[in-house]
């Protein structure tokens, strides 16, 4: 089964699966065997057995969908807030260097958005919104090109 990019089922697919479980509940009430239910609904017999146990323990209500089973997501509006914070740079948030790490982004999300995300969820959120894990190809403001040129001309030949 193919999942949506965020992982888990789409809303339509989740509704479809819930419909299957509720249809199975009607068949359970009629006394139909698990093998017949599985064949009729085109699902595995093991799934039908799990559904039957849930139905026995909690009735039709136990077979209803419990919502998406995924990590807490950041809305597009919240990501714009996060992006504005990230563009300020790590120094504005109290770190001494100009490097964003997933752990640092996780802390900013916690402080600014009051959400708790795992490192994997932070990575997926950043990737999904067009951020890469690569270091940008820009030079530091403190870089002294004349000193670098002098080092390349004087020191590097002796190192080779």
Image: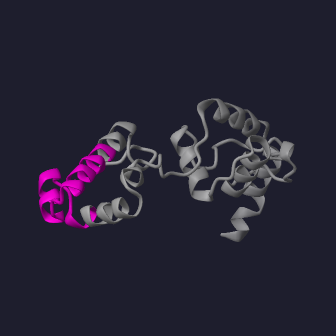
* 60 with respect to 158 (left or right): left
Question: Residue, x 65% and y 69% (percent of image)?
Answer: 160
| Picture coordinates of residue 65, whole percent (x, y) | 41, 47
- Kindly indicate the quadrant of the structure image that contains residue 146: top right
Residue closer to the observer: 3 or 146: 3
Question: Residue, x 63% and y 43% (percent of image)?
Answer: 137
* Residue 153 falls within the magenta-colored stretch: no
Evaluate whether residue 100 shows in this view: no
| Picture coordinates of residue 139, whole percent (x, y) | 72, 43
Question: Residue, x 84% and y 46% (percent of image)?
Answer: 93
* Residue 20 falls within the magenta-colored stretch: yes
Image height check: is 138 above or below 105?
above
- Kindly indicate the quadrant of the structure image that contains residue 36: bottom left
- Tally of marks: 0
- Kindly indicate the quadrant of the structure image that contains residue 92: top right
Colour convention: one colour
Residue closer to the observer: 80 or 56: 56
| Residue at the outermost bottom position | 159
Evaluate whether residue 124 shows in this view: yes
* 56 with respect to 27 (left or right): right
Residue closer to the observer: 50 or 124: 50
Question: Residue, x 69% and y 54% (percent of image)?
Answer: 101
Question: In the image, which residues are magenta?
Answer: 18-47
| Picture coordinates of residue 50, whole percent (x, y) | 32, 65
State the predominant SS element of the stretch in magenta: helix
| Picture coordinates of residue 66, whole percent (x, y) | 46, 49
């Amino acid at each position: 089964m193919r999942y949506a990019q965020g992982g888990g089922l789409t809303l339509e697919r989740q509704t479809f699966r819930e419909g299957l479980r509720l249809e199975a509940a009607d068949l359970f009430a009629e006394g139909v065997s698990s093998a017949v239910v599985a064949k009729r609904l085109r699902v595995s017999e093991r799934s039908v057995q799990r559904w039957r146990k849930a139905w026995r323990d909690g009735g039709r209500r136990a077979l209803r969908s419990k919502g998406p089973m995924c990590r807490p997501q950041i809305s597009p509006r919240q990501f714009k807030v996060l992006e504005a914070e990230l563009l300020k740079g790590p120094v504005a948030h109290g770190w001494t260097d100009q490097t964003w790490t997933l752990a640092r982004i996780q802390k900013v999300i916690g402080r600014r958005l009051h959400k708790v995300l795992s490192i994997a969820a932070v990575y997926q959120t950043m990737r999904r919104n067009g951020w890469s894990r690569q270091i940008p190809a820009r030079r530091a403001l403190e870089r002294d090109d004349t000193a670098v040129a002098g080092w390349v001309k004087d020191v590097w030949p002796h190192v080779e």
